Amino acid sequence: MTLFNLLFRNSDLECPRCQGKAFVDWEDIRRLDKILKWTPAPCAYCLGTGKVTKEILSKVPVDYTYLTIDLPEAEMDKIKEGDEETLEKGRIHELFLDELIKYVENHHVNNKMDAESIANLYLSTEDENALFSLERENLKLYIEKIIELKRIESNQK
Ligand SMILES: [Zn+2]
């Protein structure tokens, strides 16, 4: 093997997020435990190439939720460069989702509320300075998804 090949191989590793398929499907989403956080889409970790460098592997966790194909390119670049401020924003985003999921489960299970009422309650108490928020229709759809998943989970027990 030539030195060139060796170097090339080092920066040409199979993407661990999509496992080289260039696309993140439901199987990957389940494997990485992102069911309520991602939907199937081209892989943002390898930018749809199926290959990644050692550098990104060392800078960004493969299951880093915030890095999806929906982000503006500049934001993706910052994440891949390991920009601390952007990475922190992503961690806050994940906390926001985790809190929202807990909030919905709690009101649905303990107070028997439906998606519409939970959305209303959430929006009425939302901090207007919150860094992340969802507009009403998307929030309702997201809440429906959380409730649906909860229902499937409890049927499996
Ligand atoms: Zn990938």
Image (tube, rainbow, N blue to C red):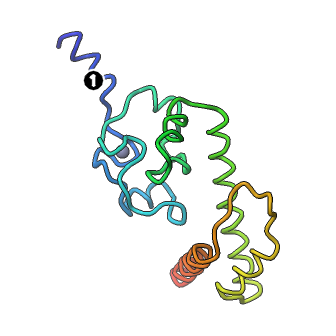
The image shows residue 25 at horizontal and vertical percentages of: 35, 60
The three-letter amino acid code for the residue at tag 1 is Arg
Q: What residue sits 35% from the left and 40% below the top?
A: 15
Q: Quadrant of ligand 1?
A: top left
Task: Name the secondary structure under disc 1.
Answer: helix
- Cβ of mark 1 under 8 Å from ligand 1: the answer is no
Q: Is residue 62 left or right of residue 120?
A: left
Q: Quadrant of the C terminus?
A: bottom right
Q: What residue sits 22% from the left and 13% below the top?
A: 4
Question: Farthest residue toward the top?
Answer: 3
The answer to whether 92 is drawn above or below residue 125 in the figure is above
The answer to whether 129 is drawn above or below residue 124 in the figure is above
Residue marked by disc 1: 9
The answer to whether 42 is drawn above or below residue 137 in the figure is above
Q: Quadrant of the N terminus?
A: top left
Q: Nearer the viewer, residue 131 or 109?
A: 131
Q: What residue sits 26% from the left and 16% below the top?
A: 6
Q: Nearer the viewer, residue 27 or 124?
A: 124
Crowd around label 1: few <14 · some 14–19 · many ≥20 (10 Å): few
Q: Is residue 40 left or right of residue 22?
A: right
Q: What residue sits 35% from the left and 49% below the top?
A: 18
Q: Is residue 110 left or right of residue 65?
A: right
* Residue 46 falls in image quadrant: top left
The image shows residue 55 at horizontal and vertical percentages of: 45, 26
The image shows residue 7 at horizontal and vertical percentages of: 29, 16
